[in-house]
Image (cartoon, grey):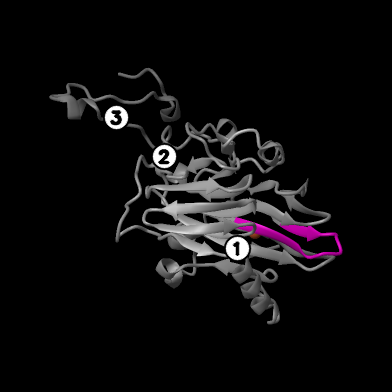
Amino acid sequence: MSTVNDMAEMPVQLPRNPANAAEARSRYFNSGNAFNIKLPPVPGRIFTDEPTSAFALEKTGFINCDLSAEMQCPFPATTPLMLARYAVIKSGEGLDTTLTNTASIWYAIKGKATLVVGDENAVLGKADVFLLPGGVPSAITASEDSIFWLVGNDPQLMFDASAPIIGDNAAVSFVHYPAGEISHQLDVVYGTNANASTSGHALIFSAEKTQASRNIATTMTLSLNTLKPRSFQPPHKHNSAAITLVVNGDPAYSMVADAKCAWSPWATLVTPPAAKHSHHNDGDTRAEFLIVQDGGFHYHARTMGFEFY
Ligand SMILES: [Fe+2]
């Protein structure tokens, strides 16, 4: 018999006389001790050292924006379900971009390169966006020193010890959004009036396979948000975590849970789930920022919880 009176203080309960290995693997908790593990919160953070390292162009490889230690997460992660990275590829060199995720969303910060994905290929230039399916052999070869920013749902698959499905039943296909086309499509959006219920002029990226959900990937969303000179996006919150790449803002900043995060070129900003936040353009030019969220996950789970303050 246990000598502990408070059920919340009880240790794990083991089976008494397991008849076999499967029974021996069983464990029991109770309504007092099962739910009192407190995970550390997702930190609000702006990563500025990582883009500086990327621009040093020292060696070809990935530079993670890693908050796994702060989140007590056993694998690299920027938010619980997403990992943001910079990819550096020196001129004449190649990088294997075959990743264990459902999808990764890429933005070309600088350079020129060729991409091979399965039996398809593309020429990549500055400000291109592309979507890579996880698990499909892919590689980038740079013809100029190149830097990319990417966000994948690698931590989601690590958490669930799962692997991407490839082939006809894959969640996403390779999709290329060339810079010139993105610029044109954004102009089309700018030709309309911003709706009072939206948060400014933004271009939302989607794809043939995910068009019904209006997302780019199953669990992730991608938006190119803009702020006109001397304007701001009003404070709001959502249960999706957001990872933002500063594309242009001179000067601009974000407020995240009442902390001011000054933007710097190509910085990565983390907005924790449910944190109050707003984005502010104090400059005379249009501010642009790319936002990846695990919004597809929350939309599907009916847990988005979007609210303006
Ligand atoms: Fe937001």
**Location of residue 30 in the rendering, given as x and y in whole percent from the top left corner:** 36, 34
Callout 2: CB less than 8 Å from ligand 1? no
- Residue contact at pointers 1 and 3, CB within 8 angstroms: no
206 relative to 82, above or below: below
- Location of residue 116 in the rendering, given as x and y in whole percent from the top left corner: 44, 52
**SS at circle 3:** loop
Please, what is the three-letter code of the amino acid marked with disc 3?
A: Arg
Above/below status of 296 relative to 265:
below
Spatial separation of the CA atoms under disc 1 and disc 3: 44 Å
Q: Which residues are magenta?
A: 278-291
Residue 281 part of the magenta-drawn span: yes
Element under disc 2: helix
Report the predominant secondary structure element of the magenta stretch. Answer: strand
Image position, residue 191 (x, y; %): 69, 81
Q: Which residue is disc 2 drawn over?
A: 158
The kind of residue on which mark 2 rests is: Met
| Mark 1 residue type | Ser
Q: Residue at x 66, y 39 (%)?
A: 54
Position of residue 238 relative to residue 101, above or below, is: below
Reading the image, the residue beneath label 1 is 223
Camera-near label (1 vs 3) is 1
68 vs 47, left or right, is left
Q: Earlier in the sequence, mark 2 or mark 1?
A: 2
Relative to 152, is 63 above or below?
above
Q: Which residue is mark 3?
A: 27
| Disc 3 from disc 2: Cα separation | 23 Å
Q: Residue at x 32, y 52 (%)?
A: 165
Q: Is residue 157 magenta?
A: no
